[in-house]
Image: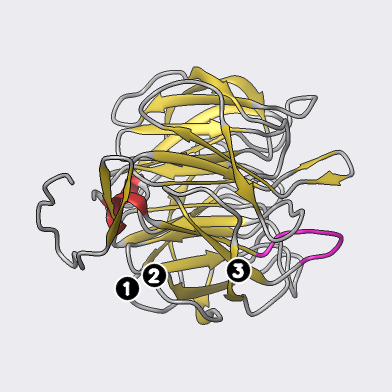
Amino acid sequence: MTTQSFKTGYDGVGFLVGNTFFDRFSTGRALFGGGYTNTNINVIQYITIETTGNATDFGDLSQNVRTVAGLASTVRGVFGGGNGTSSESNVIEYVTIASTGNATDFGDLTVGRNRLAGASSESRGLFFGGNSNLNVIDYITIATTGNAIDFGDLVTGGSELAALASPTRAVVTGGSGRTNTIDYVTINTTGNATTFGTLTTARETLAACSNNTRGLIGSGYAGGYSNVIEYITISTTGNSIDFGDLTVARQGASGIASNIRGVFAGGSNASTNFNTIDYVTIATTGNATDFGDLLSETASVGGLSNAHGGLNI
């Protein structure tokens, strides 16, 4: 068993995988909220990231919704926007990740929208873009409840994009019209986004996740359904680099991560929805491995975890 340094809130809970001990901060729990089967759904489901296996029911969102954005602290998971009761929802709701149960109202986005992206640090959550090339960035303080506040604007408005974070920087990429743009902001400031670089393959309806140094961008639509995974080093700027391939080419997947693993879940290819969950080891490169299955074949699901790269754990 490895020596565990003390962290604020460390509760001593963990398990062995081979000779490696994973505490709850390095392994984490991932939640997937809403999505589209043959209709919008309100299901929240979860996995333990450093294991493998099928997802388990967690509870329900307040509405049947797809293309919702997810973000999280170590304690609280937040879902915002999407195509729900309104085609352009402004609803923000939250759950306590370590428990199970239904979501609770948090507040409202500054603008109701779907097909947006979310990323966060431990304290602040950001919602990016949405609708038809909306350039709005909103922020919330995750530990409180209340309405979102304007943060600034994206370099170019976008929907069907993806976001990831380190503790200091949030990165947003892709988008409608098969965009190759990568933008970034400094999370604890406010202001407009700055250009980071470009993707190897311009695409929309993609997914992203990260540990605190490396970001992964996978899946999407690039004139055909993509199985491409590429990576960036978050603290620098520059173009993405090829990482490997997903097990299934698809769009509308959800990306989540721990410090060790990146996971891509769900998605669709033409008229087929997938329950596929893939994973990779973030610090290496290579093709994804099967993790297990979602509760149903689901596209456009929102994802979050309590061990992602924005949390500095």
Name the residue beneath numbered marker 2.
Answer: 76
Sort mark 3 into few (<14), some (14-19) or many (20+) by Cα contacts within 10 Å: many
Residue 32 percent across, percent down from the top left: 58, 60
- Does the residue at mark 1 contact the one at mark 2 (Cβ under 8 Å)? yes
Q: Earlier in the sequence, mark 3 or mark 2?
A: 3
- Mark 3 vs mark 2: in front: 3
Q: Is residue 278 magenta?
A: no
Q: Is residue 67 above or below residue 228?
A: below
13 sits left or right of 170 in the view: left
Residue 86 lies in what quarter of the image?
bottom right
At label 2, the amino acid type is Arg
Mark 1 falls on what kind of element?
loop
Residue at the disc numbered 1? 143
Local SS, label 2: strand
Q: In terms of sequence position, does the residue under pointer 3 or pointer 1 come before the other?
A: 3
Residue type beneath disc 3: Ile
Regarding residue 197, the answer to whether it shows in the image is: yes
Image-quadrant location for residue 194? top left
